[in-house]
Amino acid sequence: MTPRTGMLLLTAGRLMREEIDSALGARGLSLRHVSALGHLSREPGLSYSALARRAGVTAQSMQATVRQLEKAGAVARESPAGRGRTAELRVTARGRDLLGELDGVVRAAEEPLLAGLSEEQRAALAGGLRQVLANGWRARHDESPPIQPPPPLAPTP
């Protein structure tokens, strides 16, 4: 019996998450930090609410994550004057450096999973997964994803 593609995706995702969680945990970080920094690096000025929607978490949870990133000097909050105004969040120079480190963590975690695949197979897999993600977004949100295709965490040198 051939395994269902969805089950293969779930298993591969679990393996990646375990590797990344372990490496990030050693740095006092989580995937939520990576997600927030990645979204803010691609879309500077997002509010807490918009960032939470992109990451699929509550605004309260994202506020706690951003506070931790602010404390680490990775994110700056820019708010117009006045109570109740929407905060605009931006990645700092330290945050960009951290994104580079986190990209290395992701690369190290994915390499054992991609071992034995040619560059052509890796590109085809990435392209297929981008399409799966876009399809999933459209099915859930009845619209095109906000960013197509998802860029790497940090610019490639």
Image (cartoon, rainbow, N blue to C red):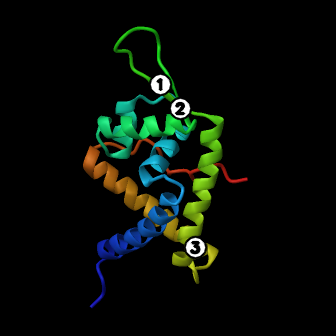
Within-10-Å neighbours for mark 2: few <14, some 14–19, many 20+: some
Tell me where residue 131 appears, x and y as whole percent: 42, 59
Q: Count the marks.
A: 3
Amino acid type, mark 3: Glu
Q: Is residue 121 above or below residue 102?
A: below
Q: Residue at x 61, y 79 (%)?
A: 118
Amino acid type, mark 2: Pro
Which of the two discs, 2 and 3, labels the residue nearer the N terminus?
Answer: 2
- Mark number, residue 111: 3
Tell me where residue 85 appears, x and y as whole percent: 38, 15
Which quarter of the figure has residue 18?
Answer: bottom left
Q: CA distance from mark 2 to mark 3?
A: 30 Å
Q: Residue at x 41, y 41 (%)?
A: 65
Q: List the residue tagged with mark 1.
A: 88
Q: Residue at x 32, y 42 (%)?
A: 143
Q: Residue at x 47, y 18 (%)?
A: 79
Tell me where residue 3 appears, x and y as whole percent: 30, 83
Which of the two discs, 3 and 1, labels the residue nearer the N terminus?
Answer: 1
Tell me where residue 78 appears, x and y as whole percent: 51, 21
- The quadrant of the rendering that contains the N terminus is bottom left
Q: CA distance from mark 2 to mark 1?
A: 8 Å
- Mark number, residue 44: 2
